[in-house]
Every structure is written in C-alpha cells, then in structure tokens.
Amino acid sequence: MIFGEELQKVAKILKESDYTIALTGAGISVPSGIPDFRSPGTGLWEKADPAKVGSIWGFMSNPKRFYNWIAPLVEKILQAEPNPAHLALTELQKMGLLREIITQNIDFLHEKAGSTDIIHLHGDISSGVCTGCGEEFPSDDFWPEVLNGEVPACPQCNNVVKPNVVLFGEPLPPGVLTQTWKAAEKAEAIIVVGSSLEVTPASNLPKVVHSNLGKVIIFNLGQTTSDPIAHVKITGDASEHLPRLIKVLKN
Ligand code: NAD
C-alpha cells in the first residue's frame, strides 16, 4: 500500500511516545469545504492580502472591507462539518495516543468531531468584543448582520464589534500561549496536520519538540517549513491518510 511503511513508522512513534500533541492548520479543514490561505488556486491569499485586510490596522481603518473579506469564510465555517481527518484525531485521543490539539483554525471542527483538550491559538468566531466599551457578544448577535452586508455595532456605545480572532499584528492571548508552550515542552512527539508552518508562533512548535529530541510527524499536501526536521512526512490529503493511520494502529 502507498505510504504503508511511513504509516507504520508513525504508528510506532505514537505507541512509544508518552506525550503526543497535534498542531492543525487551515489545511485540515479544506476537505470540509473551508478554503485555506495559501493553497494554489483555492487559497484566500490570492483573492486579497490577509496581512493587509486581515490585520488589526486593516480592521480598525476599514471594518467594512474586513467584514466583506471574511464573510464568505465565516459562511463556510458555519455550514461545515468535520471530515475524516478531524475524526481520526478524535479517535487517536480516545485510543490514549494524543493529548492536546493546538489549532490555528478559527472554526470549531475539532469540537464538532468530539475532540477534547483543544487550544485555539488564534481564537475562534464564536464571540466578539466591542472596540469601544469592551462588551462581549456571542456570535449569534453579530454574524447574521455581517452576512447581510452590515458592519456590526455595539448597542451600548455604537463602536464597531471585532470578532475574537487574532488578527495579523495582534498578540496571542497570554493564557493560550502558556498552555501551548507547556504542552510543547512535555511533548515527545508532535503531529502537524495541514499547516504550511509559515505563521509564528505555531511554526516554532515542531522546532521546540525537535530540540527536546521529540519526533516530528507531518501530514500535508505540499511543503512546510519544518519538512527538514520531520521524522516522517506524509504528503497528500490528510483526510485520506489519517484514517489509514487509525487502521494501521488497530491492526
Ligand atoms: P495555510 O493556508 O498557511 O496552510 C495550509 C496548508 O495546508 C498548506 O500547506 C496546504 O498545502 C495544506 N493543505 C491543504 N489541503 C490539505 C489537505 N487536504 N490535507 C493536507 N494538507 C492540506 O494555513 P495555516 O498554516 O493554518 O495558517 C493560516 C492562517 O489562516 C491561520 O492562522 C488560521 O487562523 C487562518 N485560517 C483559518 C481557517 C479555518 O479556520 N478553517 C481557514 C483559513 C485561514
């Protein structure tokens, strides 16, 4: 079978590791119909520059442009269901072979797949905050307005509401960073799924595990910046290969 030997190697690493974590990026949700930022042809980078439109400065200077850009992504996220890659990670947790899932994604597909111990490095779209008075709002209060082409405003002070996702140029929430580094320091292995590893600090996680003599396993359609330190690299669709790994582990 194609990749059979590599998947056997991954299975061996997972069985020998006492602490394995996963890092997921936009690519794991592509088979669920949510486009990533960098894949050729479908990537959102090609339609607009997220570093500009999706930055905190881009948001504050032109919230209408930001919401017009993010609305199609949010619409897809709200409709999406987990795919076999998300379900395979849940299965690994149930088998006692995987601890934290650290995700760069702002969707909830790991939650929908029944996973636990999920760390959202970049926040998620389930809530928002007023940029004026700091009032918090659940997503039901403002995404319907955004999907109708409006810019959501705070009912108390009329300032614009910002979704609780980490925009380019914004710091990561300190609690989330601490949880992430604690997990990475303990990890004897890391499985990276669907991330180009071009965005820090997530891109540093495989390096931390590697420098502690842990094993780095990468599932990705294309290249990643940590390919040179990967013990096993499975190139292809993670929604096909991760379920194969479960079969190998159960045989
Ligand atoms: P990225 O766009 O930089 O990289 C995605 C990677 O996934 C690419 O290397 C691509 O080759 C790979 N890929 C695509 N389809 C795949 C598949 N079926 N199987 C395996 N690999 C596949 O994404 P990133 O590194 O996660 O970083 C971009 C940022 O974009 C993140 O911070 C994230 O917050 C945000 N984002 C999130 C979502 C989401 O929540 N689903 C969607 C788009 C962007």
Image: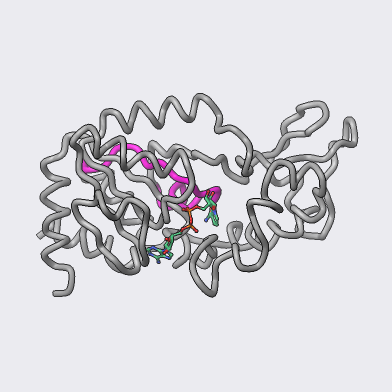
Q: Which residues are magenta?
A: 96-114
Q: How is the image coloured?
A: one colour
Residue 177, above or below 52? above
* 163 relative to 211 in the view: left or right: right
Which one is in front, 148 or 200? 200
Q: Magenta stretch: residue 109 in it? A: yes
How many circles with numbers are drawn on the protein?
0
Place of residue 126 in the rendered image (x, y in percent of width and height, measured from the top left): 62, 43
Q: Quadrant of residue 60?
A: top right
* 192 relative to 157 in the view: left or right: left
Place of residue 173 in the rendered image (x, y in percent of width and height, measured from the top left): 55, 29
Q: Quadrant of residue 68?
A: bottom right
**In the rendered image, which quarter contains the N terminus?**
bottom left
Q: At 36% from the left edge and 66% from the top edge, which residue is drawn? A: 221
Place of residue 211 in the rendered image (x, y in percent of width and height, measured from the top left): 24, 35
Q: At 78% from the left edge and 40% from the top edge, which residue is drawn? A: 161
Q: At 33% from the left edge and 63% from the top edge, which residue is drawn? A: 238
Place of residue 167 in the rendered image (x, y in percent of width and height, measured from the top left): 63, 43
* 25 relative to 212 in the view: left or right: right
Q: Quadrant of residue 157?
A: top right
**In the rendered image, which quarter contains the C terminus?**
bottom left
Residue 44, above or below 117? below
